[in-house]
Amino acid sequence: MNRRHFLATAAGFPALLQAQTRRPNILFVMTDDQRYDAMSCAGNRILQTPNMDRIASGGVRFANAFVTNALCSPSRATIVTGLYSHAHGVTTNGGATHRLRPDQVTFPMLLQKAGYYTALTGKWHIASPPTGFDHWCILPGQGVYQDPVMIANGGRVQFRGQCEDVVGDQALETLRSRPKDKPFALLCQFKAPHRDWRPAPRHQKLYDDIAIPEPPTFNLGLDNRPAAVRDSDMQIADMPDFRERGVSPSLPREERKKLNYQTFLKNYYRVLNGVDENLGRVLDFLDKNGLAENTLVIYTSDNGFFAGEYGMFDKRLMYEASIRVPMLVRYPAGVAAGRVDTAHMVLNNDVAHTLLDYAGVARPDFMRNHGESWRPILENKPAPWRDAWMYEYFEFPGPHCAGKMRGVRSQRWKYIHYIQNPQGHELFDLENDPEERRNLYDDPKYKQQVTEMSARLERLRELTQDDRSEDGTQSPPCTEGRMAPLRGPV
């Protein structure tokens, strides 16, 4: 059955699902560029996130959650389709490959066909207009932090106030006005903590009296890294963002690097405080209206973020800070509270599979091999699980000039192939080198491990029908990605 045929026949699901007496409501919450450890429940000692912690303590926190493409739009498309980015077609943040392929089916489409009231508020950031939603109110592109314009079911509306507050308001209004005779699936997607980190006035002084510790690899250079990493443009010392806030380009480089780091990370945390407050408002609504027990809540981010590792910011590369994300799940009616799962590697690919499973909607055949449902894990039932997964990144030339790559990660090993000329390779032993300092690829002692991991990568490519033939193509010069002073949202 092809995708168009599946969507056409999905209209018959409501009658089948009427036999189910209890389908969960769904609240899917996503931030933009939030690191896996940017939550107090994940051990952050500076940033306090009581409402993120509230989800974690009421359900399961996955400590090993990853994205398969650490770039906003490809990751967002993966979440709604359950597919790798080479399959759904969104491989960049702009241009022709910023659109879903026309035949793509998303989990909101399937839930809507199955009788759910579906809604989206906040950041969409895919060039294709939202489909499968009864109501949507989205930011155009990246949106702005203050007084955002939003597009509500096709019409532009000017709002006043901080973006996270506006998104929270719209989520609450959607919940209040929803039809009460249907289960709901609400996607609430915040802008923060995406660059350029403009906190609400009430948060602007937070952390002023704190010096945030620099990570152990803050001063680790990139000289021994492959060209695709060395030539990327993500150094904190070169950030132009804070010139208007007192970080002069005339300062010595090391001093500028330290000041940029403190200013960037404090504002990154401040805008996350805005997210947490509005998350709390939505969770309070569920509690006060008797909805919390039967609402499946997932909280995550579209990718991770470098916060000074190797002197960098941004994401894109297959290093841990970039690919690891928060992943919290709460469902009081079906998931025991207070567990941290460290045994399973879960992916953003899995979100659609999990939600369809809990909603009682059959997973289309074309989604198989791209993701899995977390339901057995959440319900503590034995089930086979992945021992490795594939990473891919294709936006080049583009912002920050990170080269195209593919890779594979297991619990212990990570292999990365930078696929353009000059090609490069990295192999890391994450058990003995969690900070990814030592590339073992050229060490003869690890030749067998390289062979095994590269073979795993090819098997995963075959399994997910990745037939992109870009290996060894000549890299064009990357000039558009060189950092310049900001002139608007990026």
Image (tube, rainbow, N blue to C red):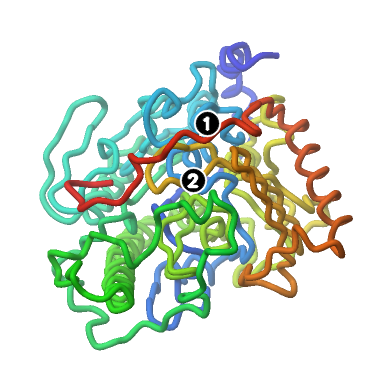
- 225 vs 329, nearest the viewer: 225
Is 449 on the left or on the right of 353, as rendered? right
Give residue 138's position: percent from left, percent from top: 28, 37
Q: Would you name the residue on which mark 1 appears?
A: 111
Q: Residue at x 61, y 14 (%)?
A: 9
Proximity of marks 1 and 2: CB atoms separated by less than 8 Å: yes
At label 2, which amino acid type do we have? Ile
Give residue 396's position: percent from left, percent from top: 47, 37
At label 1, which amino acid type do we have? Leu
Could you tell me how far apart the alpha carbons at marks 1 and 2 are, in whole angstroms?
Answer: 10 Å
Binning the other alpha carbons within 10 Å of mark 2 as few (below 14), some (14 to 19) or many (20 upward) gives many
Q: Looking at the image, can residue 483 be seen? A: yes
| Image quadrant containing the N terminus | top right
Q: Would you name the residue on which mark 2 appears?
A: 26
Is 385 on the left or on the right of 198, as rendered? right
Total numbered labels: 2
Q: Residue at x 23, y 78 (%)?
A: 206
Q: Is residue 159 above or below residue 216?
A: above
